[in-house]
Amino acid sequence: MEIRYGIGALIAVTALLLAGSGIATLSRGWLLPWQRRHIVRVRLFGWRNS
């Protein structure tokens, strides 16, 4: 029975962290590092690659 309380507490803490991250994203535009898109350098037409 105690393991259920532990798992429930872990799920609750995780849900609170995700909710806090969502609020920070909406209010400030802040994202967690793994939620950001990777920026790929675009090759410019006509430029030499050296």
Image: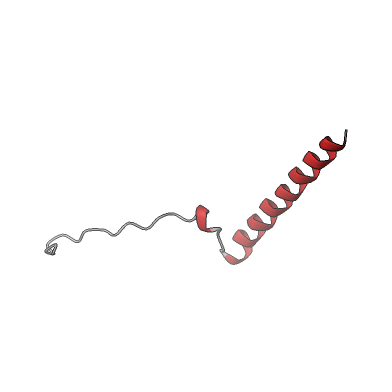
- Pick out the residue farthest to the bottom: 28
Report whether 40 appears left or right of 11: left
Report whether 23 appears left or right of 33: right
Q: Residue 31, position in %: x, y?
A: 55, 59
Q: Residue at x 80, y 45 (%)?
A: 9
> Relative to the observer, which residue lies in front, 13 or 28?
13
Q: Which quadrant, please, contains the N terminus?
A: top right
Q: How is the image coloured?
A: secondary structure
Q: Residue 35, position in %: x, y?
A: 52, 53
Report whether 30 appears left or right of 19: left
- Pick out the residue farthest to the right: 1
> Relative to the observer, which residue lies in front, 12 or 30?
12
Q: Residue at x 48, y 56 (%)?
A: 36
Q: Residue 4, position in %: x, y?
A: 83, 35
Q: Is residue 42 above or below residue 28?
A: above
Q: Residue 50, position in %: x, y?
A: 13, 64
Q: Residue at x 73, y 52 (%)?
A: 16
Q: How many marks?
A: 0
For residue 21, which quarter of the picture? bottom right
- Pick out the residue farthest to the front: 2
Q: Is residue 22 above or below residue 12?
A: below
Q: Residue at x 40, y 55 (%)?
A: 38
- Pick out the residue farthest to the top: 1
